[in-house]
Image (spheres, coloured by chain):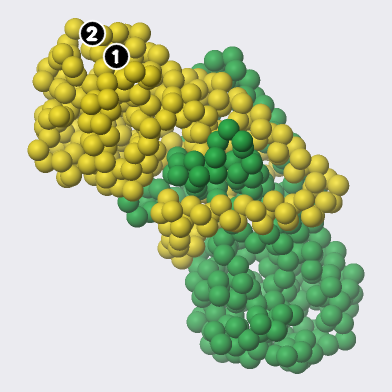
Chain colours: A green, B yellow
Amino acid sequence: MIKNVAIIGLGLLGGSVGLAAAKHLPDITTTGYDAAPDVRAKAAELALVGTVCETLAETVRDADLVVLCVPVGAMRNAAGGLKGLLKQGAIVSDVGSSKQSVLDDLRAELPGQIIIPAHPVAGTEQSGPDAGFATLFTGRWCILTPPAGADEDAVTALTAFWQGLGAKTEIMEAAHHDLVLAVTSHIPHLIAYTIVGTASDLEDVTRSEVIKYSAGGFRDFTRIAASDPVMWRDVFLQNKGAVLEMLGRFTEDLTAMQRAIRSGDGETLEELFERTRKIRRSIIEQGQDDAAPDFGRDH
Amino acid sequence: MIKNVAIIGLGLLGGSVGLAAAKHLPDITTTGYDAAPDVRAKAAELALVGTVCETLAETVRDADLVVLCVPVGAMRNAAGGLKGLLKQGAIVSDVGSSKQSVLDDLRAELPGQIIIPAHPVAGTEQSGPDAGFATLFTGRWCILTPPAGADEDAVTALTAFWQGLGAKTEIMEAAHHDLVLAVTSHIPHLIAYTIVGTASDLEDVTRSEVIKYSAGGFRDFTRIAASDPVMWRDVFLQNKGAVLEMLGRFTEDLTAMQRAIRSGDGETLEELFERTRKIRRSIIEQGQDDAAPDFGRDH
């Protein structure tokens, strides 16, 4: 049974875990810590967790579950800081976007501990302690990637915790998670960051023109490209293999489209454009996006 | 003075022009035509224009302005159909996403006519006569691309018409328009269509997984990739030069990102990701997108 939850890192994700727990799981006690004193102060002001602590030791002393909510490149250090501070039987988990690297890092630093990495597939382009909200996980999927032989009661307890926060849950191998998320999240972010960079570096089209005429499609990409730079830098470095694999497939397909345009092959273009419509329909039917046109933007 | 406006093609754009004119410019009379009988019937039912006509001749007989709202690949045929039907001094315009090809096509078919192509940078991923609405152009930019020596009164009148519909207007050379829109609209669409295709063709990640975990970023791309297939096929074929040019720059930049990931160069990644945040801030400040996180999606 999870009674006390310690949240390490109080940004968008950590703050949302704390707020969702307060809203949905009032019997659970939460403590929180952030390495930055101003973030701790803001988190206390906003009551993101029950108690904002001044030391890691105090934060995790009574915790049955410790959730690391730091960039994936900072996981190893964060886990290292917990050495010798944890209760016997405490579960160590996280919310990071790459899972094999996190699993390896946590096991290396905390060899005696129960380690069950997790990834709630939810977020916004905003970051920091102001960005969290209690309903971030409602109806979204949280993927747990327990290593082979993981404590089954702990997996059950962590599953119940995430379902309690409003999420749907799935169990997956870490390596498969990394491949799936490379295509549904990491490559989309990389492409968005890149095209926004391309557009702002042009000489024959001004930045003012790019901004004025962004409603033609470009503005959609700028939302994702406004996401936290350090978090995303770490994702690409930590999930390098799967990202490069999926990027290779995307650029192959893009080259085929380029050839179709150059040779005036309208059939190939139209065939793809018809197929892609259906995927959106399925996403809406399965409650993973709103049906309103243009994301329901105000017109 | 524009008193009578004929709208050829009654889909998302044509329907929205008719509805916006009825709302904002009640003194203007609108007629409309669509080659598809079922679209004409639906347009009449929804009162997209004042009068839905059964022939092109009847539609344009009294028109001071004819607005072609058909895919850019159909412009030449549509213009050819107007030969000998237009009033002396009538302005022929359009709403197409490529402008040099439209200018060339309209001039070839209607050599004696006043031709002023235009492009309202507005739309949604939906299409057809049901998709139009009166406020589609509010606060969006409409780019006019009059050829050198175009009738100044006609440019002034068309500018006033679009401003009357709620748009902001800009004058640009057709070739420059095509370069600007290649980066702010056409390449974003091509990339979105391609990644959605890549994701649905994978063997090691199922389509069901792609849909379930689409909230990680992928779902944003599916909106654009649900846009009208024929319209977009035509855009890529008609604006081939500018699209291939901008695609070349994008793939160069993407290759540089790929190299940075492969070599573990976090600095290069973070530097780009910091820069791209600022562009979104400018787009929001200039009223070209909502400030609400995650496009204001319901959480």
Q: Mark 2 belongs to which subunit?
A: B
| Secondary structure at numbered mark 2 | loop
Type of amino acid at the residue the image marks with label 2: Lys
Q: Which mark is residue B79?
A: 1
Towards the viewer: B271 or A249 = B271
Q: Residue at x 48, y 24 (%)?
A: B175
The residues bearing labels 2 and 1 have C-alpha atoms spaced at a distance of 7 Å
Front residue of this view, candidates B171 and B111: B171
Cβ atoms under marks 2 and 1 closer than 8 Å: yes
Whether residue B216 is visible here, answered yes or no, is no
Q: Give the quadrant of residue A120.
A: bottom right
Badge 1 density bin: few <14, some 14–19, many ≥20, Cα 10 Å: many
Residue shown at the point (62%, 30%) measured from the top left:
B247
Same subunit: marks 2 and 1: yes
Q: Which chain letter matches label 1?
A: B
Q: Circle 2: is it few (<14), some (14-19), or many (20+) Cα within 10 Å?
A: some
Label drawn at residue B206: none
Percent position (x, y) of residue B277?
60, 56
According to the picture, the residue beneath numbered tag 2 turns out to be: B83
Mark 1 is on which residue type? Ala
Q: Position of residue A215 (x, y in %)?
A: 44, 44
Question: Would residue B184 be seen by someone viewing this image from the given angle?
Answer: yes
Quadrant of res B226: top left
Quarter of the image where the N terminus of chain A is located: bottom right
**Up-down relation of residue A181 to residue A78 (above or below):** above
Q: Is residue B277 above or below residue B231?
A: below
Q: How many marks?
A: 2
Task: Give SS at disc 1.
Answer: helix
Residue visible at 51% across and 54% down?
B282
Of A140 and A187, the residue lying toward us: A187
